[in-house]
Amino acid sequence: MIKSKQYQNDVMATAQLPLDWGKLRSTSILLTGACGMIGTFLIDVLMCRNRVWKDNIKICGVTRRKAEAEKKFASCLEEGLSFLEWDVTTPFPKEEEQIWDYMIHGASNTHPLAYSADPVGTIGGNVLGLWNLLEMGRRCLKKRLLFMSSVEIYGENATDIPAFAETDLGYLNCNTLRAGYPESKRLSESLCQAYRSQYGIDFASARLSRVYGPTMREDDSKALSQFIKNAVRGEDIVLKSEGNQYFSYTYVADAAAALLWVLLEGETGEAYNVADERSDITLKDLAGLLAKSAGTRVVFQLPDQEEQKGYSTATRAILDGRKIKGLGYAARYSIEEGLAHTVSVLREGYKL
C-alpha cells in the first residue's frame, strides 16, 4: 500500500483536514490496535504529518507481535513511530510507563470468526484492555483517552427508529455468545464514565459504523470484507443471506478522520456516531456494486456453522451522524467512492 498512489492520496487528504493540528504537535500517543484496519491508516496519516509538516508526533503502537509490526511499518520507524509488545488484557508493564498526552484504545476482535472462535478474548480486549489503560492513565495520562466504540452497542432496531442517535438504544439479548462484542463495548463506555467521575479521566468515545478499506486484515471475515476480496480477485460476490440488512458504512480514511475530530474537538464524556447518510446501504446492494465493478455476479451461499455463530442478528443499524458534524467533521467518501478506492489499492498489488 505504501507504493499505491491512490492510498497515498487518501492519506494525504486526511492529513490536510482543517483540524487544529497544533494540538498534536510534539505530543505522544499510545495506540492499541496499532496494526488493525483503522490503526494502520491512522499511523500512516500521523507519520505523514511528521514527514511533511514536521509535527514531531511520537506514536507508541501496542502489539502482541512487535517484530511483525516493525516489518510492516519499517519505513516509519525513523519518523516518530515505535512499538511496544504488550497483551492489553494484562496490566501495563511498569517499566514502560511514561507520560502520554493521548491514549487511543482500538485493540479488539472485530469480525465474526474471531467473535465465535475467541469470545473470551473479544470481551477481554475491550474491557480488560481499557481497564488496564485507564488504571495506567490515572498516573500517566496528560490529556485525553479516546475509545473506539461501535454501532453494535445499539443492538437490534426493535422500535423502527429511522437512525440511531447517541441517546437511543435498541434490543440486545445478552445471554448469547455473539453478545460478547456489543456488550463489552457497552460496558467499556460505562467504564470510561466511571473513571471520569471517580478519577477525573478525560475521555471521548467514537461509535464507529461498519468500517472497510484496503488496510483490512487478511483474515477479516466480515461480509463486506469478503465481498471486497471477491471483487479484487475477479470472483463472483458470495452473499450468505438474503442481503436485506440495512447498515451504515464508513471508509477507513473517513473513520480515521472522525477519530481525530473526536480526539481533538469532542466534548469530554461524550459519544459520537461516525456515519454518513451517503453510505447507508443494504448488503445485497453492496454486493451488487462490487459485482458490477468486478464484472462478475452475485451468488448466494449458506454460511457454515462457525460463521453463523459470529454473525450479528441486527437487520437495521443506521447511525445518525449529525452530532459529530457539529464538531466540524464531514465524511469525504461516498460508499461508491470508498469501495472504488479500496479495490483500486488492493488491485495495485496488495496480496489478499
Image (cartoon, rainbow, N blue to C red):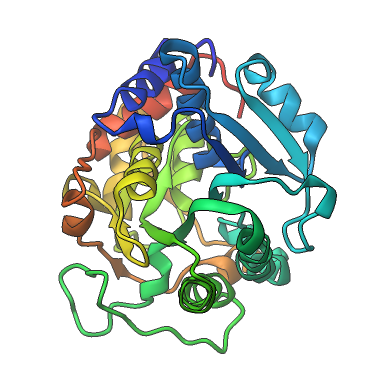
Q: Is residue 294 above or below residue 133?
A: above
Q: Which residue is drawn at 68% across and 69% down?
A: 128
Q: Quadrant of residue 133?
A: bottom right
Q: Quadrant of residue 165?
A: bottom left
Q: Residue at x 49, y 32 (%)?
A: 41
Question: Where is residue 74 shown, x and y percent of the image?
Answer: 69, 18
Q: Can residue 63 be seen in this view?
A: yes
Question: Where is residue 282 shown, x and y percent of the image?
Answer: 27, 55
Q: Is residue 215 above or below residue 274?
A: above
Quick check: 49 left or right of 315?
Answer: right
Question: Where is residue 256 shown, x and y percent of the image?
Answer: 40, 39
| The C terminus sits in image quarter | top right
Q: Is residue 125 visible?
A: no
Front-most of residues 55 and 156: 55
Front-most of residues 35 and 283: 35
Q: Residue at x 53, y 10 (%)?
A: 3
Quick check: 238 left or right of 114?
Answer: left
Front-most of residues 160 and 46: 46
The number of numbered discs placed on residues in the rendered structure image is 0
Q: Quadrant of residue 35?
A: top right
Q: Residue at x 48, y 34 (%)?
A: 42
Quick check: 287 left or right of 235?
Answer: left
Q: Is residue 34 above or below residue 277?
A: above
Q: In this view, does 256 lie above or below 174?
A: above
Question: Where is residue 32 shown, x and y percent of the image?
Answer: 62, 48
